[in-house]
Image (cartoon, rainbow, N blue to C red):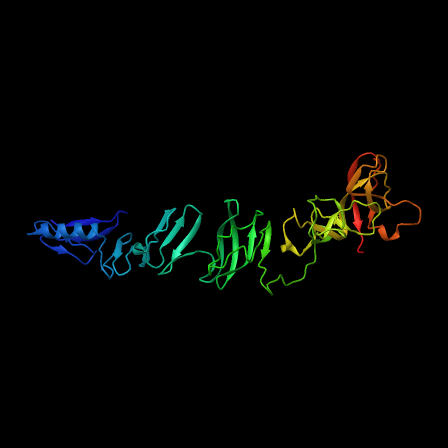
Amino acid sequence: MAYDINKSDGSLLVTVQDGSIESSASSIKLVGKNYSGYGEFIAEDLIHMLEHFAETTAPTSPITGQLWFNTAKNKINVYDSVGNWKEIGHVVATATEPNASTRVTGDLWWDTATNVLYVWNGTAHVPVGIGSGTTAVRIVQIEDTGGTTHTVIVEQHNNRFIKITSGDSFTPASSELQPDNTTIVSEFPTIGKGINMTNRTDFKFRGTATVAEYADVAERYQIKEEGSPGDVVMIDFDGDAEIRKADLYATPYVFGVISTAPALEMNASAGPDSTHPYIALSGRVPCKVIGPILKGQKLVAAGTHPKTTEPLPGVAMAVPFDGNRTDSRFAVALEAYADADNVGTIEVVVRGR
């Protein structure tokens, strides 16, 4: 008696007649009742299914959901409901790079150590991102001089970094290399929070800046002793540094104020804040002062405490109303400060000198 072969969804695949072999409805041979020598067909069907019809060409008469291992590509495929063989992606998740001998073009590798996705291009694993090969946007990990690893976004062209976007500030270790084996630190001596451009000639931001979050124009200068934001500085006219904290009363050598948050940072690669702080040359900036100061009064370097004569390097005071010290006035107070005993901080406008 013939019997019906139904698929998983209950629909009829084929009716197999007694004493026959049905091989047109699917990729395996279906044995009818009382067929002599059926054992070989059943055994081969089991083997074919076990190896997922491993062959260079797709099996004939496939049905939805069937698997086929393409030996030409070493890839597993699945037959979909609209009649297409679809290659199933292979993703390896490990902290160590998979051996090249096990990879075929298109294989994916998720690096669990760096959380970066790579694709095998036939010769190497390349990070998945915008662009490919030597020109791309990549997620990169850079080790600093203290051994801490920082994850950054890099834009590269011809295997050289053009821009690094970072959420941290750090100095790259000298052992850290770009894809062309150029050291990172040679082109990015320090990496700050935000967007960092290479120091190579002609690589610049090119556009129109219409808005600035902060209010002063500042440049890095070599300081004699480490200062802090708000310190008034002067030319180190009798020393080896470029500037020092202003330590002379009403000196005409006042140069500016150590900036808290510059709107424009010039000479950025001259050195770190400890040796080359940003000096506000013009604009609004917090400044250390000793009172009394009235809003709108012009300021000069204090040099010493007006009452105790103790040294007050880096501090400003109101200019006396004596008609003198014209060349010494470097800023205008934007707010009053009444305390004549203790140093405080107020907003001032540094005037270009």
Quarter of the image where one finds residue 314: top right
Which residue is at the front of the view, 102 or 19? Answer: 102
User: In the displayed image of the protein, which residue is found farthest to the left?
Assistant: 36
- Residue 195: % across, % down: 59, 54
Quadrant of the frame with the C terminus? bottom right
Q: Residue at x 26, y 55 (%)?
A: 68
Q: Position of residue 181 (x, y in %)?
A: 47, 59
Q: Nearer the viewer, residue 50 or 263?
A: 263
Return the x and y of residue 189 as percentages of the image width and height: 57, 54
Q: Position of residue 235 (x, y in %)?
A: 76, 52
- Counting every numbered tag in the picture gives 0
Residue most toward the right?
322
For this view, does 65 lie left or right of residue 117?
left
Q: Tell me the residue at 34%/59% (across/down).
A: 105
Residue 110 appearing in the image:
yes
Quadrant of the rendered image containing residue 132: bottom left
Q: Can I make out residue 31 in this image?
A: no
Q: Is residue 139 left or right of residue 91?
A: right
**Relative depth, front residue between 278 and 224:** 224
- Residue beneath the point at 25% across and 58% down: 71
